[in-house]
Amino acid sequence: MSNFVNMDIFSNYQKYIDNEQEVRENIRLVVREIEHLAKDAQIKLQIIHSDLSQISGACGSARKLIEACAEKYVKLATLVPPGQYYRYSDHWTYITQRLIFLIALVIYLEAGFLVTRETVAEMLGLKTKPGDGFHLDVEDYLLGILQLASELSRFATNSVTMGDYERPLNISHFIGDLNTGFRLLNLKNDGLRKRFDALKYDVKKIEEVVYDVSIRGLSNKDNKDGEQSVAATE
Amino acid sequence: MSKQGGGSHRNNAHKKRQPQVAVDEDNPIVQAFRNYSTELTTKHDRHERIVKLSRDITIESKRIIFTLHSIDSRKQNKEKILEEAQQRLNKLIEVNFRSIALELRDQDVYQYRNAYSAGLQEFIEAYTYMEYLSREDNDEPPKSVSDWQALQSVMQYVENPSKAKDEGASVEETDAAEEELPKKFQFFIDPTEYVLGLSDLTGELMRRCINSLGSGDTDTCMETCSTLQMFYTGYISLNLQRARELWRKITTMRQSVLKAENVCYNVKVRGGEAAVWGSNFDQKPAEDVDEGFY
């Protein structure tokens, strides 16, 4: 009677898993390169919190680094076998979210609107539909956008410090729209949901800044309103 | 469709209703988010449907395993039970796994892995246990346990449009393919899931080893024990990284092996007394380890 346990199963599985390890190893190398580029871009963009005049320069250099990331993504896409995106996606979700955030920040600083998923995907050289190949996951996009909200609340505070009293109002409108958008989503009790729950703190922070600015009549736009409300309290 | 956990759903519905009155549909952000919302909902719904299907498979597989444990050499009920188990397992393949396969068609199977993994593993446990028991007496063609390729070859399906519609699972897919010839599809068996499911079989073997002692069938004790030892050798021969789940299972497996070895030791030492004291033997050694039914 031959054995019930077929030892080939284990040697075959070992081969299978060794293959997988190799793929992961290669993915990790490329992801690390992307991480370096993204970090540089993030550092370049930190200047917005201390010098408003350098914003467009910072955006320019960040864009270059993002372009370099796009090249790496092309390489990454070749490493992932078709139809197995989610088998390996844990390697790159984090850094992709970070890049989405950086792109969204650059676009917001340059143009003042929310970058769409399609544009982000294009800038990173990714597809939008899973069926078309290496794509940009919609949840990653949304998580990246939530990072943008936190950064903008910090930016609102700092622009006041640097004497720009208009900016917090724009940011406040923008985050308000964003908040409305997120409320349209039917979220499950998952990571995205948890991260979304933190959005209200960013909203609150920005609203406080706007309040401080308007009640003291610092903003030109709200100058009248501000004076009126001050007068009313007197 | 109630696809969400009670609490979160209520919460959501509440939150959603208020701002919807004031939502400015011309706002580009709102328009974009409407699309994202549809996409997320589609994904969540599919996930929930698969979870449901998987849960049915888990329950039925556990029941089959339970039935298989009622095989008792003193009752001569083996053939009947094996036949029943075989039928029920086939039904799982033909109905439940087929539905999951339909859901997963043209999808990235790894994306929904968490949704079906539990059911698949439990099924593999039941299936291989059935195989183990059926080879004991038909030793003319002594077959080894099916590997994942063998299981994969049973999970092949041919599209049957009218039936697919009845199941209501994926009407769009069937619509698109209606004019063409029946298409083939399969339920993809991930080798890792297979290896994880197979590792659970050792728990059942341990139980069979101990139960056989209870009925005085010491040959079965020895046989299951040596099978267990071989499985254990196979599993520890694997050289793995990033496999916490499997590592946990191998630890459990070691416990099962030790228990079975202890049974064999007792058989050897006390021999004929076994049938007498076996009835008092602790029959629930692994309650914390396994998932119910005992």
Image (spheres, rainbow, N blue to C red):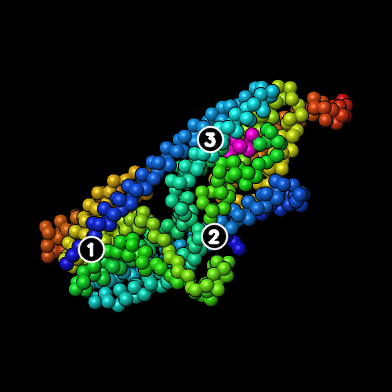
Query: Residues in magenta?
Result: A100-106
Would residue A72 be found to the left or right of residue A194 on screen? left
Callout 3–callout 1 Cβ contact below 8 Å = no
Disc 2: which residue: B46
Look at the numbered disc 2 and give the secondary structure of its residue: helix
Amino acid tagged 3: Ala
Structural distance between the alpha carbons of marks 3 and 2: 36 Å
Mark 2, chain letter? B
Quadrant position of residue A203: top right
Callout 3–callout 2 Cβ contact below 8 Å = no
Same chain, labels 3 and 2:
no
Closest to the observer: A125 or B51? Answer: A125
Q: Residues within 10 Å of mark 2 (few under 14, many from 20)?
A: many
Percent coordinates x, y for residue B127 in the rendering: 33, 66
Amino acid tagged 2: Arg
Look at the numbered disc 1 and give the secondary structure of its residue: loop
Disc 1: which residue: A4
Amino acid tagged 1: Phe
Percent coordinates x, y for residue B281 in the rendering: 23, 60
First reached walking from the N terminus: tag 3 or tag 1: 1
Would residue B204 be found to the left or right of residue A37 on screen? left
Q: Residues within 10 Å of mark 3 (few under 14, many from 20)?
A: some
Q: Nearer the viewer, mark 3 or mark 1?
A: 3
Percent coordinates x, y for residue A87 in the rendering: 44, 50
Q: Residue at x 43, y 51 (%)?
A: A81
